[in-house]
Image: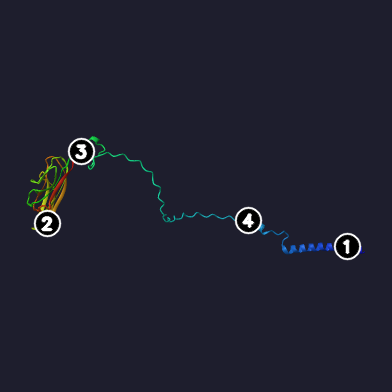
Amino acid sequence: MVLALIIVIPLLVQSSTTSAHYEMMGTCRMICDPYSAKPSATALEVMQDLNAIPPPPMAQGTRGEVGRPGKPGPRGPPGPPGPPGLRGPPGDRGSSSKKGHPTVTSGTTPKTEIDDINTSIVSTKIAFYVGLKNPHEGYEVLRFDDVVTNLGNQYDPSTGKFTCQVSGIYFFTYNVLMRGGDGTSMWADLCKNGQVRASAIAQDADQNYDYASNSVVLHLDSGDEIYVKLDGGKAHGGNNNKYSTFSGFILYPD
């Protein structure tokens, strides 16, 4: 009897424990998932399912107009200077000429002719500068009798005339001081062989003195005469002060 109880009791205990286990499992399943018999899904599985659903199709609108261009940005700072360039080749050597005298050059004139022109310019020295000592009036040639320069001796102080001996281009200028005070005017003309080539006038406008001046560039042939002649009025002399002067020189010969 005792032996039988020993065998039966463990079996009952094991059987009771097994039933209680299944009962607890069943109760847990009912509490955790009371509305579905399916096993529960994890959050990761739910997100994967949502991502698998394709989005609804979207209608594409019309293309908008092109926008206006933006304003230019501010000017940037200047860049650094570049490296210096390569040194150029040396230039051609120039032609030699006499020191202190200009050289005439031409693209078509032979060298021998250029040398002849240069020699002619250097060898031709014609220039004069004279002043007026004694007063003059009326319609007479002004005899500038105070000779300062007379290269070539082509100006004659006794007549007041420059007589050309070398044909070429010449420059002349004169300044004559009017002796006024009586309300009159003075005219002074530069003449070439009796023909007026330049004129000047000085007027007595409530003052005693005024200047008449002019300049010319003329071509002269050998024998032509150049002089200054009054055409009315009074010219002031001035002793050695040279208030009235007459000068000229050759630019280049023919």
Q: How far apart are marks 4 and 3 (CA)?
A: 108 Å
- The kind of secondary structure element at disc 3 is helix
The disc at residue 51 is 4
Q: Residue 119 carries which label?
A: 3
Q: Distance between the residues labelled 1 and 4?
A: 59 Å
Distance CA(mark 3)–CA(mark 2) = 46 Å
Image quadrant assignment for residue 103: top left
Q: Tell me which label, 3 or 1, sits earlier in the chain.
A: 1
Q: Using the rendered view, name the quadrant where residue 73 is placed.
A: bottom left
Q: Quadrant of the N terminus?
A: bottom right
Above or below, 29 relative to 91:
below
Please identify the quarter of the rendering in which residue 156 is found: top left
Of marks 2 and 4, which one's residue comes earlier in the chain? 4
Q: Nearer the viewer, residue 3 or 116?
A: 116
Give the distance between the C-alpha atoms of the residues marked 2 and 4, in whole angstroms.
116 Å
Q: Hey, what amino acid is under mark 1?
A: Val
Residue position marked by numbered label 1 in the rendering: 8
Q: Estimate how packed mark 1 is, as few (under 14), some (14 to 19) or many (20 or more) residues with alpha carbons within 10 Å.
A: few
Secondary element at image label 2: strand
Asked if the residue under mark 1 is in contact with the one under mark 3, i.e. CB atoms within 8 Å, the reply is: no
Query: Is residue 146 or residue 210 the one in the foreground?
Result: 146
Label 2 belongs to which residue?
209
Q: Which residue is drawn at 63% across and 56% down?
A: 51
Near mark 3 (Cα within 10 A), the count class, few <14, some 14-19 or many ≥20, is: some
